Image (spheres, rainbow, N blue to C red):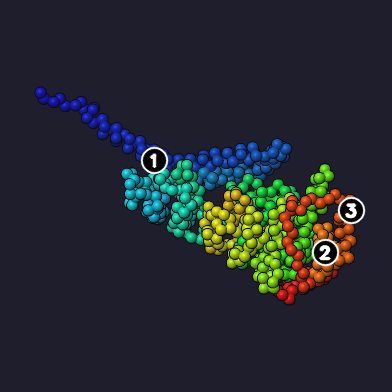
Amino acid sequence: MARRPLPRILSSGSAQIARSREIARTAADSATDVLQPLITVSRGLRKLAATARAKWAATPKERRGPTLLLVAACVLVVALVPYGPLLALVTLMGAAAWKGRERPVVKTGPDDAEIARLKGLYEALVPYFSVPDDPSPLFAHGGDWSGAFGEFAFDEDGRPTRLGIAYPPYFTDGEPAARARVEQLLHAKSGRGREYHFDWDQEGNRLVMSVLPALPTTIAAQRFVTVPGETVLGFTDGDAVQRTVPVVAADGTEDAPAVVWRTGPRSAEPHLLAVGQPGSGTTSLLRSIALQALPHGDVLIVEGGGTGEYACLTGRDGVLAVECGLSGALASLEWAAHETERRLIAANRARQAGQPAPEDTRRPLWILLDRPGVLGHLAAADGRPDPQELLQVPLRHGRAAQVTVVVAEQFDSTDTLSETVRSHTRARIVLGPASPEQIESVLGTAPHTTPTPQMPPGRGYARLGTGPVLRLQVPATPDPYDDATSEAHRQAVLALLPERRPAADAVAVGTAGSAAAGVESEDFASAGFDTAALKKVSVEAVPTSAPDPAPATALAPAPPRHEPDVAPAARYEGEPAPRHAPVPAEG
């Protein structure tokens, strides 16, 4: 049977339809080219109208009337000026054309260089995220990287700033060693010199690597908005803490996320240990803590380095002593131990009598000990007890007696720290460049970021008790007597220093607690204290009708007293503060 030919309209219809589509497309392109200025101006007018509407909505109601009056006055002036309406129309069309111009095309995918870097990262991760028995491995040599990398971002140099990685469920992400190997690889392949944050989602089998911005170093020492018992150690990332404090920085006032350390009877971390390299900022941290503690408490400073970094605090109200020699340090720490016992006894007597604790036992006492390893070495050479042994009572019973101990030491002397100091300082800070192993040895766990080899002073990590490891930037608190200190920082520190007190009051304050604790006055006479003022203050401090003291078993035994044979150098309050603290003969 012969096949009939198709009708003409059916055989030639497809060609006519294609030709019609081509004509319509050409006409649309031509019309778009002709009407492009009108389209641009219309788009610009629409954007200008949206901007004006948004500004009107943001204008407060009490200012809308004057705004309308000003606009009406401008319109009237333009209408009265010769050629004013025409110039206004031309200006409006020009602004609309500029506002509605075509924007550059937004980049939606990686370029060739970025694809090559992603492929390199994918191939480098294959030995860590694959096993030979996997029938359909997510990571395989020569595989597709797009299935493993869900999100990515790059900087101007082509280095990744954010990378989301999906890894197989059998990867041992619960082992710190396995995670550390992957983090070290990504750190090396993505570019050194930057601080990376690794967020492991063990439930979803995802790892997000992101580059952290540098913490600001423009915040100097100042009065922070805190309550008594709270100390601002420094500032961290915005998403790491839930509290911000208003601060004055170099570019104005802002709310900065702060690492707040709480002390007192209800604190879980009543004492602090700071460790760092030389020049890392541990001394600035202790100065910052002292300036924040002085408005609400008393401060006793013992400096083992003997460099006079705390000379600006000598003789100030609330500063009991600033000691840099071995004899003065031992006498001051022995006084602090007996003062802790006295506070415990007085509080116990008050509780037995059904009365509140005395006022002098509720005022916080801060013991700041900088570089105790140097003093321990001098004490061992001279046959004297280690100053850290005198910290046993303040460390063990300081929480109940409102006594807080802060110890700062360098990495090369951490082996000299006593077991009591290590076990009772549950708030930890590491400042300066350090390896992950060093940071973990101090904080108890490794941080989720990669430490950089170069850090500004005061930059490091903090961990309060069993909490997370936080990045930290200590507020700039340099020595105001140092010639290298900038004038702005010098004035900021000097503005926080209390007034100087008379010399007689300084001696009386430093010896009153010791007399109340039962320390013999001849011990302090040999150390250079005024025994007459000691007896006068001790009579006023100890009530004559006090009930019997608590049993001796309720307190830890007091450390043995010593007989210092070299008196510390006398301080004269009328003279200007010295550049460097006096160093005794044995130092």
To which residue does mark 3 refer? 544
Report the side of 263 relative to 185 (left or right).
right
As helix, strand or loop, the secondary structure at mark 1 comes to helix
Q: Is residue 75 visible?
A: yes
Q: SS at mark 2?
A: loop
Count neighbours of disc 2 (C-alpha within 10 A) and say few if under 14, some if 14 to 19, many if 20 or more.
few
Q: Does residue 133 appear to the left or right of 324 in the view shown?
A: left
Is residue 222 in view from this perspective? no
- In the image, what residue type sits under mark 1? Asp
How many numbered marks does the figure carry? 3
The residue closer to the viewer here, 4 or 484, is 484
Tell me which corner region of the image, top left, top right, bottom left or bottom right, holds residue 520: bottom right
Q: Which residue is mark 1?
A: 29
Q: Earlier in the sequence, mark 1 or mark 2?
A: 1
Quadrant position of the C terminus in the picture: bottom right
Residue 488's place in the image compared with 254, above or below, is: below
The vertical placement of 95 against 414, above or below, is above
Q: Residues within 10 Å of mark 1 (few under 14, many from 20)?
A: few
